[in-house]
Amino acid sequence: MEQRTGVQYLPVRQNIVWGPVLPQDRGRIVRDEQLLVNAGLHSRRTTMEALGVPDPDAEMQRVKKEGG
């Protein structure tokens, strides 16, 4: 839209997340993400995003508050 109108809308950015087209094995995805976090290849926030947590930052705060 900025290219068409010349108006800059920074710092607003949208992130469109498309759901999977085919059914997925959620258990397998969770195990894979757990391995990536344990190996230091993914952050917990990235894993939450991959698992579809709507607000990873708020979830991280709840985890910290609960002592996890």
Image: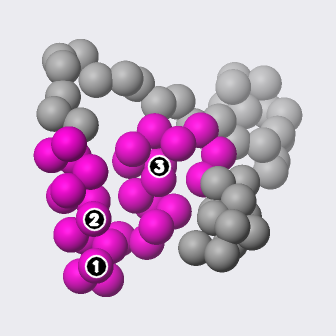
Amino acid found under the numbered disc labelled 3: Glu
User: Which label's residue is closer to the chain start, 2 or 3?
Assistant: 2
Mark closer to the observer (2, 3): 2
Quarter of the image where one finds residue 23: top left
Q: Is residue 28 left or right of residue 64?
A: left
Residues under numbered marks 2 and 1 in contact, where contact means CB atoms less than 8 Å apart? yes
**Which residue occupies the extreme bottom position in the image?**
40
Label 3 to label 1, Cα distance in Å?
16 Å
Location of residue 52 in the rendering, given as x and y in whole percent from the top left corner: 46, 39
| CA neighbours of label 3 inside 10 A, class few (<14), some (14 to 19), many (20+) | some
- The quarter of the picture where the N terminus appears is top right
Front residue of 64/51: it is: 64
Amino acid found under the numbered disc labelled 2: Gln
- The quarter of the picture where the C terminus appears is bottom right
Q: Is residue 39 magenta?
A: yes
Location of residue 24 in the rendering, given as x and y in whole percent from the top left corner: 18, 28
Determine which residue is flagged by label 1. Answer: 38
Magenta stretch: give its range: 27-56
User: Does dot 3 land on a helix, a strand or a loop?
Assistant: helix
Amino acid found under the numbered disc labelled 1: Asn
Q: Is residue 51 magenta?
A: yes
Residues under numbered marks 3 and 1 in contact, where contact means CB atoms less than 8 Å apart? no
Q: Is residue 48 above or below residue 67?
A: above
Q: Is residue 3 above or below residue 57?
A: above
Determine which residue is flagged by label 2. Answer: 34
| CA neighbours of label 1 inside 10 A, class few (<14), some (14 to 19), many (20+) | few
